Amino acid sequence: MILQKLLDDFGITEISINNYRNIWVEKDGILGPSDIHFESEHQYYLFVKEICRDLNADVSLLRPFISGKWRDFRVHIASDHISQNHFIISLRRIKTKSWTLEDFVENNFLKPNELISLQKIIREKKNILVVGPTGSGKTSFMGAILNSLPHNERCLILEDTNELHIPNDSSVKLVSYDEEQELVKSVHLNDLVKESLRMRPDRLIVGEIRGAEAKDLLLALSTGHSGSIGTLHANSASEALLRLEMLIQIGAPQWSLETIRRLLFLTVQIIVVVNKSEHGLRQLNSISKVHSLENFGLVIEPYEFNTFPNSNKWDGSGRSAF
């Protein structure tokens, strides 16, 4: 296979194919052009068909986008019908290593005092939202949190793409799917949230909150499923709450803003922000807690980290209103 060298290079985390001669790769956090390319448009077309066959799906006018797990990658394909006659493929490597929180300390993603605070948050079963931009390490970090849980805590992992490792034998995973055939019913993430409540979860784990399932998830959390975890694309804690507001309004446009904010206050306790620098370095940026609900909105403040003797206390920027 033309791309085999790129697929086998574990330093490469992303492969972006714009057309058969234009391929870019992210290596060590930096995006750059690849000197490997397909020989012809037809050869590239056969590669697209190979992926579609493995996914048991096909891009078409009826289904211009497909996504799923292909080999060790999360793959997304945009049809040539809507992208100027070229298929566009995005491949993101799924981490095969099951990380622990201690691994993140060793790799300078976490500081030791942050690790102690996170362990306390997890032990107290606070609901955690892990947020950050694309490629910042949200999924890997959430996987590390899962690996720190007791073996007899039953997690219901809900995903659109099969990425997270099941942490113990008592836990299970549900993965959504989207079918273009009229006789086959699609199963979306909000369907999985509703069904998971009948499966005795100790914790609900949502791979990525990005649609109307936000309403169903937060309603589920308000019924007492503490210690649940989800990820969300956002650059800060306040931006994450704003995005959640908008997603809930998609699922429940009849709800007032006051109702939505009260639901957020009851269900979201800790917001962990991770990011990736321009040099490709991934790190924990902040840990915040939802402090109170005021007339003007939710108030968030930095979580007070546990510290070791003679260590500097984390200098959070103070409260911020949302």
Image: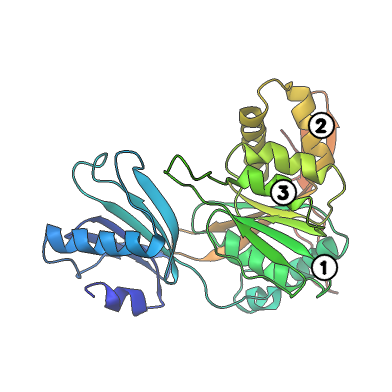
Name the amino acid type tagged 1: Glu
Residue 57 picture location, percent across and down: 38, 54
Crowd tier of the residue under label 2, counting other residues whose Cα lies within 10 Å: few below 14, some 14–19, many 20 or above: some
Residue located 62% across and 75% down the image: 99
Residue 316 picture location, percent across and down: 74, 52
Residue located 20% across and 70% down the image: 36
How far separated are the C-alphas under marks 2 and 1? 28 Å
Q: Mark 3 points at which residue?
A: 195
Name the amino acid type tagged 2: Arg
What scheme was used to colour the molecule?
rainbow
Considering only order in the chain, which callout, 1 or 3, is on the residue closer to the N terminus? Answer: 1
Considering only order in the chain, which callout, 2 or 3, is on the residue closer to the N terminus? Answer: 3
Vertical arrangement, residue 283 with respect to residue 297, above or below: below
Foreground residue, 17 or 181?
Answer: 181
Q: Is residue 312 visible in the rendered structure shown here?
A: no
Crowd tier of the residue under label 1, counting other residues whose Cα lies within 10 Å: few below 14, some 14–19, many 20 or above: some
Q: Mark 2 points at which residue?
A: 262
Q: Which residue appears farthest toward the front when viewing the image?
A: 183
Crowd tier of the residue under label 3, counting other residues whose Cα lies within 10 Å: few below 14, some 14–19, many 20 or above: few
Marks 3, 1: nearer the viewer: 3
Q: Name the residue under label 1.
A: 153
Marks 3, 2: nearer the viewer: 3
Left or right placement of residue 273 versus residue 26 in this view: right
Residue located 45% across and 39% down the image: 182
Residue 40 picture location, percent across and down: 11, 62
How far separated are the C-alphas under marks 3 and 1? 18 Å
